[in-house]
Amino acid sequence: MARFQLFSEDSETPVVDAIRGRVLLTLALGVAVMLLLDLLAGLAGIEIAEFGGRTLGGEIELSTVGKRIWTGTIVGLIFGLAGIGLSMTYSILNFANFSHGDLFTTGAFTGWGVALLVAGWGVGDAGYLLLARSGTGPSSTDIGASIIASPLAILIGVVVAAVATTGVALLADRFVYRPMRDRGGIPLLIASIGVALALRSTVQFVYGPQTRGVTGTEGIERTDFLGTGLSVDLHQVTLLVVALGLMIAMHLLLQRTKLGKAMRAMADNKDLALVTGIPTERIVRATWILGASLAGIAGFLYVLERGTMNYNVGWFLLLFIFAGVILGGIGSIYGAIAGGLVIGFVHEVSLIWISSDFNAAAAFLIMILVLLYRPEGIFGGVTTA
Amino acid sequence: MTASEATQPGLRDRFIGWIEQSDRRIVLATVAFVYGVFAILVILEQGLGLGTVNSIFGAWRTITFLFAAYALLTLALNLHWGYTGMFNIGVAGFMAVGVYTMGLLSTSPDALSGQGLGLPLPIGILGGMIAAALVGLVAAIPALRVSADYLAIVTLGLSEIIRLSAGSRTLSNWTTNTFGAGTGGGSGMDLPDRPTDFIFNSSIGESIADVFTVDVPRIDMLLFEFGNREVTLISSSILSDFVWTFVMLLVLAGVYWMVRRIGYSPFGRVLKAIREDELVAQSLGKDTRRFKIKVFMLGCALMGLAGILWQGSQGFANPNSYRPVVTFYAFIALIIGGSGSNTGSVVGSILFVGLLFEGPRQVGAIISARLNLADAPGTFDGAVAPLAQLDVTPFLAYAVDNIAPLQFVLLGVVLIIIIQKRPDGVLGDRTETAAAIDLHKEETNE
Amino acid sequence: MSDATTTPPAETTTETAATPLRVEGLEKRFGGIVAVDDASFDVKAGTVTGLIGPNGAGKSTTFNCITGALTPTDGEVYFQGEKITGMRPEQIANRGLVRTFQIARALSEMTVLENLMLAPKAQQGEKLWRSVVPGARQGVVDQETELRERVWETLEFFEIDHLAYEKAENLSGGQQKLLEMSRAMMTEPEMLLLDEPMAGVNPTLEDKLLDRIHSLREDGYTFLLVEHDMDVIMEECERVIVMHQGSILADGNPDEIRDNEQVIEAYLGEDI
């Protein structure tokens, strides 16, 4: 995958590149040390005078730091889970899929529609529930779709999110991407923008434009979770368990099964895969099924943790998911997971130092810098999944 | 439109052939077509009456304004993507840089929301363009290093960083305290009035408005009896908007002239060569980096200008007007017209604004006005359930009520179909030879 | 063809004029693989020199290192006495060392005419402001008019003038090779590096191409060409350089090469 302009890149001397790399690394380390000092000073309650009237330290509560790290992990897992599919389509189908965020949305809405129907059976009108509380009807507290009150509804929701999203992705592949398989990355990217627009607006048309709450929250909060002193909500724990489980399953699938090996081969070298007789259309279909399922489930879980959703939910997260995938190195699912976690951390933990106006911008900035200076990802460019 | 109906194919073909002879005719014919369609749509919605004139002009005002705005954007984008192959999807961000810089320089220091330095407007506009070009320079560095799909993500990320910065209360407070100017954060920023507005705030404006106010009896020969009262054929707010739109059209003409000259020049030839195969251009001795930086900065400056004339003329800037979807609209307009062609960019903008952007809303208005639909159901299930009894009215009413998302579905589908079936755009595969002269062998021409 | 053919490269008395291209100890590694290993050779002015070798011998990599498409890991390249190692492709091209590609790289959406008009160096109209500003543009127009004349002459010389208005993508593989060579000629080069100019060219066109190379050499141009077709190499080249596994195996006139044991071994089974 020559994502670089081989030539303009190659013609620079390696020495210059190495120096630039060293400078950047030093700079990054310097910033990291400063931030760490600031954090430590803050935890200790010391204020150290710094240039320009700014001070290091100040008051930071340990529990705040813990909470940020925890939410960073949770959000990072979502980015990572959704990023796996994005990374796979990028490396196997060779295009940046801008509709991936809307697959995420599709999973959230279809999954929650059915989850609410199961959880709220008899409480409200079926249409109202299936459309994820579109219109007027019982409140989300009355329906009580939570992991405690109705674990079955959540489980079914996860399954439906995966299945429905897969269906949508396969339809999109059949009618949009397949006819233009050989057209190169950019036409496919543009087509995926079309899919994104159409998909998001269809969700809006069917489910309505409003932001709605869907989860029940009674008994979800656990203070002093397992004696850690952290206040944890069980939906976050559910998310953690399901996400980790799926990631391990993906790992086993890619490493142990014939299909997984074939997919890795194709991600590495499409021509080689063609020659060695791996049925590529089958691999493509498997890519969509796996990628879309994970995106859909990620959407469902994200809403489980958030409690609310609207039709823009996935689109707004797309760039973060991209950031994670790029950070981890396109084509590697481990990279996507690690990169997603890093971006989640940056997004949440950076709030200790910077205003909430800028935590998203910080994540995007890191993504841009990685693209410019280390396009193979921070984990070394091992593309084999 | 008018002549192509109800004539024999021979005549029709000849008519189309005549139009295709020159780019100007293509553009004018498309404009006339879209204007005609809208006149008919408005009449279908409202029936024929004296007030219809105002409504038709109101519709024309909207499409002309949006057309001028999108055509400016599309021409700039065509320099990047159509000519040079640089896939910039941060258009909205560069617009925002233009508009906000203009505001920071020229908004009054006493504005209610946001604060500027109160400098004269021309300085603000120029400053906005320069700032957009400079941000373009920063973005051009990745353009030199990375491939098209990476550049797409970089520019999209940059445009979101710009939007988030513009919407940041913290940043705004800090700059206001330090430099005396700030964006107003999420609550938006007041912008200077349109420079043309003074016309309609003065006596000149009144007399112009008078021209379009008629005593009804004078024209009841043409129309039906209305009684002896004054009727405003075209309201002064519409006229005022038209004056501003006219300014935009003048700028558009200037920009079109410029990009056309670039297209028909050795500079444009190198841009095309970079798009086709950068290594070949380099191997022929072209320093492609310089060309890419120059054209990227120029395109960004034009995007800043387009932003100022469009969003910046609304008296108020809101960070949410610069979401990436604006960029995608500009891309749809460009791809419809055919990327790589300046004339195609303009034609695509007209078609996009007329048929995809404003058209569906107008059609929705007609349906709701004419079909006497019952109260629209509030939710999708309420719309779908009656379909079982073959009652389509509730669904139709729901669809009309929710025309906006349907319109976006349409946009997405059109984009997909065009990129699949007609990647060269509606005008097809055009040859716009990149040379300053006619390259035919005859020594006679020029 | 007056301009391009009647103005052969300027002659100077120094030794660098006699051997415009010198390659010394060239080495290129990709990761652990050594594609070119300590290759040294030179090319004499006004000759057609062939660079041959089995697949994977490192010929194209050598080409890419000479022309700046790749940066050599070690070694130096001199062109007319100047060190050009590590220069960017456009800098090397602007010094008069111009290449064509193994697989023809026509600018496919551009017409044949545009392809040729692109090539000349230092065009006024390549300055953005000159192309736009009304007064300055006249100079651009004048230069374009001059170039047009040369373009047509070149097209006629290569006998592809009947294709002038075609988009390059509509040309056959062989025609694209001719297009590439005529495009390279439009830069008024000192020396041409042709990467497999005959690959995929039908015999009629091949004769035509060879004919052009001949007459250009008569005019004093220097050629270095990579070629697979042994007949072409043996008939057309004064000198043949043989590469094998990244190194120079032999260097001499065609007869010497034909009888060289090592070369025969390297081409084991192949008929030289």
Image (spheres, coloured by chain):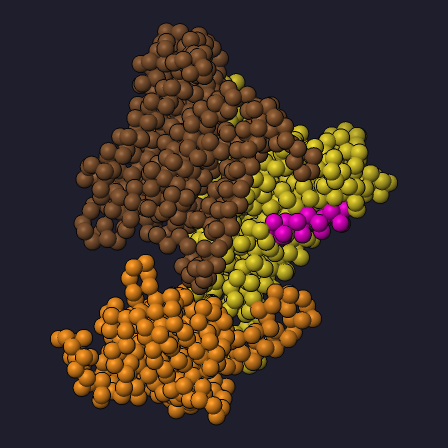
| Dominant SS type (magenta) | helix
Task: Tell me what residue is drawn at x 64 percent, y 71 percent.
Answer: C137
Locate residue B353, reporting x and y percent: 56, 43
Q: Quadrant of the C terminus of chain C?
A: bottom left
Start-end of magenta stretch: B121-136
Residue B130 painted magenta: yes
Task: Tell me what residue is drawn at x 50 percent, y 81 percent.
Answer: C150
Give the quarter of the image for residue A99.
Answer: top left
Does any portion of residue A110 appear in the rendered image?
A: no
Left or right, C104 with respect to C56, comes to right
Q: Which one is nearer the viewer's eye here, B31 or B188?
A: B188
Give the quarter of the image for residue A226.
Answer: top left
- Write down the colour of chain C: orange
Locate residue A283, reporting x and y percent: 25, 42
- Write down the colour of chain B: yellow
Locate residue A255, reporting x and y percent: 23, 38
Task: Tell me what residue is drawn at x 77 percent, y 41 percent.
Answer: B117
Q: Residue furthest bottom?
A: C13
Left or right, B74 with respect to B122, comes to left
Residue C154 painted magenta: no
Q: Which one is nearer the viewer's eye here, C56 or A15?
A: A15
Locate residue C264, reporting x and y percent: 17, 79
- Write down the colour of chain A: brown
